[in-house]
Image (cartoon, grey):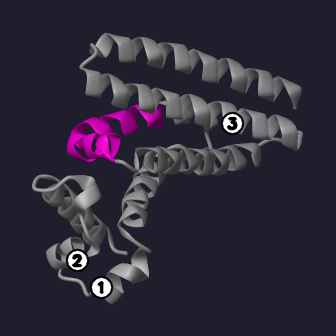
Amino acid sequence: MSSRFEQKTHETLVKLLKIKDLDSISATDITNELGLTKQAFYYHAKNVPDYICGQIRKHVKEMTDDCGNNINKLLPAAEQGMLYFRENRIIMDAIMKSEKRGMYLDCLYDSITDETEKVLARHLKKLPVDPDEDDKAALIDFISGTIFGLLRNDLESSMSKEPDNRIEQYKRYFGKAISVNIEKFLKKI
């Protein structure tokens, strides 16, 4: 898909969420707004929840693209992700209110885990020694779980109108935890 088309799909979702709740948006609504045939829609997504998950995956990939092969850049990437979620509040609020919220949050977690694994794999190519697979898996689980926790806390805090300083506390805590675990991991190698 071209970046112009991807931008249009994003704008279409925002437009539809202004008039409908997420669970009532249909493939017909999306195809009518995009000027696509249903065949073209189903080529890209199995159904509307798959389309929404595709939007989530696309954003998480964009969020981590700037990391290159530096695992320490994942937390700043997550902070950029928080900005995206805040700027696209209508989408995230709709997801948090959806009956399929658990599925969408699972999609977010899985996307973060996949991208964390890719960044770590690129990072490890620079090292002279391969790490133990269990250590690598534990680090991926820790980092992706921590980043997911940060994003989820931001989403839920925004839903409950908690002050931003609480989010800043989460970022400092999570940032330190990620750094400490990366250092421990690298010392083991």
- Give the CA distance from mark 2 to mark 3: 38 Å
User: In the rendered view, would you say 126 is above or below 38?
Assistant: above
Q: Residue at x 40, y 52 (%)?
A: 59
Q: Is residue 56 above or below residue 124?
A: below
Q: CA distance from mark 1 to mark 3?
A: 38 Å
Q: Going by the image, does 75 lie left or right of 53?
A: right
Q: Quadrant of residue 11?
A: bottom left
Left or right: 56 with respect to 64?
A: left
Q: Are marks 2 and 1 in contact (CB under 8 Å)?
A: yes
Give the residue type that dot 2 points to.
Thr
Q: Which mark is residue 28?
A: 2
Q: Amino acid at mark 3?
A: Asp
| Residue 141: assigned label | 3
| Residue at the disc numbered 1 | 38
Residue 95 point in image, percent of width and height? 33, 46
Main secondary-structure element of the magenta-colored stretch: helix
Q: Going 28% across and 56% down the picture, which residue do you hit?
A: 23
Q: Position of residue 172 (x, y in %)?
A: 48, 14
Q: Which residues are magenta?
A: 76-98
Q: CA distance from mark 2 to mark 1?
A: 7 Å
* Nearer-the-camera pick, 175 or 122: 175
